[in-house]
Image: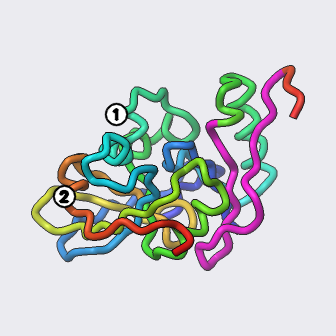
């Protein structure tokens, strides 16, 4: 699996081989920049390049999501 | 190439368009003349977005545009996150325009570098996601 951080502009900003590392990186982004909670998504792709599952978003501080 | 968010030590192998290649960009507009279409070909750097993630360490990622080598990959991505756009621009990256590209992230994903107006000129079709 490939774990990819995409922004709402459609551009990849990072990629990971481990989901835990990708989720941690996403949350670090959102902790520093709360608006990234809606602007950056973690997408999971299979080896065939097709997405798997739904995008994951970080949780902004003090947000109820 | 893997951008290697974890390793941070991978090589970024950038290719030039010595031969035409076709790639798909998720876009929000349907008309070439739509300002949304030109915006779709502006990198995060050009949009004055501060660098995030790997963009901090690799300015080339900040300067680049994500595209997909297969229409289905782009369409499936747009379907999972509709905010990205509901259309796909099919782009023929022709030699002579100074375009560069590299395999990045997952298989079939490429980062493309080019001037927005020239990329716009290379659109050969605009497809609705789901058609």
Q: Is A53 colored magenta in this rendering?
A: yes
- Of badges 2 and 1, nearer the viewer stands 2
Badge 1: chain ID: B
Q: Which residues are magenta?
A: A39-61
- The answer to which image quadrant residue B11 occupies is bottom left
Position of B79 with respect to B61 (left or right) is: right
Q: Residue at x 51, y 53 (%)?
A: B85
Residue A29, percent from left and from top: 68, 32
Residue B43, percent from left and from top: 38, 41
Which residue corresponds to mark 2?
B121
Q: CA distance from mark 2 to mark 1?
A: 19 Å
* Residue farthest to the bottom, as pictured: A48
Residue A31, percent from left and from top: 75, 25
As rendered, which of B86 and A53 lies closer to the eye? B86
Residue B7 at least partly seen: no
Local SS, label 1: loop
Position of B87 with respect to B125 (left or right) is: right
Badge 2: chain ID: B
Position of A2 with respect to B41 (left or right) is: right
As rendered, which of B77 and A49 lies closer to the eye? B77
Q: Is A30 colored magenta in this rendering?
A: no
């Amino acid at each position: 699996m490939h774990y990819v951080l995409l922004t709402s502009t459609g551009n990849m900003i990072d990629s990971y081989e481990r989901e835990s590392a990708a989720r941690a990186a996403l949350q670090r982004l959102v902790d520093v920049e709360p608006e990234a909670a809606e602007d950056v998504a973690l997408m999971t792709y299979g080896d065939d390049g097709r997405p798997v599952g739904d995008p994951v978003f970080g949780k902004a501080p003090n947000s109820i999501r | 190439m893997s951008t290697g968010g974890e390793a941070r030590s991978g090589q970024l192998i950038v290719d030039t368009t010595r031969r035409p290649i076709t790639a798909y960009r998720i876009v929000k507009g349907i008309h070439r003349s739509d300002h949304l279409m030109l915006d779709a070909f502006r990198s995060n750097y050009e949009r004055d977005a501060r660098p995030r993630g790997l963009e901090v360490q690799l300015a080339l990622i900040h300067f680049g545009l994500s595209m997909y080598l297969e229409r289905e990959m782009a369409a499936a991505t747009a379907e999972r996150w509709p905010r990205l756009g509901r259309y796909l621009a099919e782009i023929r990256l022709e030699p002579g325009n100074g375009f560069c590209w590299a395999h990045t992230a997952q298989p079939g994903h490429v980062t493309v570098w080019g001037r927005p107006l020239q990329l716009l000129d290379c659109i050969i079709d605009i497809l609705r996601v789901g058609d």
